[in-house]
Image (cartoon, grey):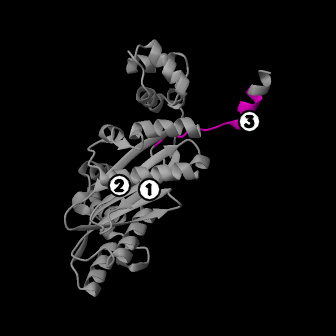
Amino acid sequence: MAVTVSMVKELRGNTGAGMMDCKNALVEADGDMDKAIELLREKGLSKAAKKADRIAAMGLVRTAFAADGSAAAIVEVNSETDFVAKNDEFITFVEDIAKLALESDAADMTAFMALPLGAGTVQYALNDKIATIGENMNIRRFKKFNDPGTVYTGYIHGNGAIGVIVGLKTDASADEIEIIGKDVAMQVASMSPKFLNEDEVDQDWLEHEKEIAKQQLLNEGKPEKLLEKIIPGKVKAILKEVCLVDQKFVKDSDVTVGKYVENAAKDLGRDMQIASMIRYEVGEGIEKKEEDFAAEVAAQMANK
């Protein structure tokens, strides 16, 4: 089977290997793409495969919005080091991924990675960046919002360490609610609420918190027969901390976030309520590798 330029480009995008290595692998595999990938891996020439087991827990969060605020998307793309996360090429790549997430209707990561981007697919573009920049990278997650009647705003903190999107159900325009939405998004970034309101609280989580509260009270020596009277108050206090609309507003602790939005809506003469929120923080939940550089240097010296 004849090996074409497009086949070589596709294999390079899938593996990050050099152009000639890709061509030779395809010739040896008689044009079979899967077999060529295996050949490159066996020969240790697949750069993406070499770097795949290295932990990528740094990176950036980026958001993208429709001009009228009717849709929004958020993405997290990871790199191994903060140095690469500040690289202009990496930043542009993440911003392109955010724009694509906004434009696409991909239902999951598999579908998203197969979307066209540049000369190939998202997966091709990612592997190309791994090969050229020299670090493992991962498009970890994305989310798109476009509920009718909702206007979206957001906030990026720390040059991309945290990203937030907030959706306001309103008849106001994006320009009218820009400041209000950003205030609420900054609240989400700083106070990290788990739920929008009490109606959205996960019941398993709530039962777990009740058990913790019960054990704390027992450890304090409270009589078990009094717990049923004390626990509801403890739970209510917890919910005020984890539900966005019930949190004290960081810019004015005399009102809750819900009350702030209600007052702002009255000032605008518009209907408005918080309909959705999402908060991404770079690397949250990823087990980071602890580097012992002293031990690494000592080991290298011992092997000389």
Q: Which type of secondary structure does the marked residue at label 1 adopt?
A: strand
Residue found 53% across the figure and 60% down from its top = 159
If the image is split into quadrants, where does the C terminus sit? top right
The picture places residue 270, in percent across and down from the top left corner, at 22, 81
**Tag count in the figure?**
3
Who is closer to the viewer here, 250 or 1? 1
Q: Residue 213 bears which disc, if any?
A: 2
Q: Earlier in the sequence, mark 1 or mark 3?
A: 1
In the rendered structure, which amino acid carries the disc numbered 3?
Ala
According to the picture, the residue beneath numbered tag 1 turns out to be: 62
The picture places residue 16, in percent across and down from the top left corner, at 51, 31
Q: Which of marks 2 and 1 is nearer the N terminus?
A: 1
Mark 2–mark 3 CB contact (< 8 Å): no
Is residue 262 rendered to the left or right of residue 181?
left
Distance between the Cα atoms at labels 1 and 3? 35 Å
Q: Which type of secondary structure does the marked residue at label 3 adopt?
A: helix
Task: Give neighbour class at mark 3: few <14, some 14-19, many 20+ (Cα, 10 Å).
Answer: few
Residue found 54% across the figure and 40% down from its top = 288
According to the picture, the residue beneath numbered tag 3 turns out to be: 294
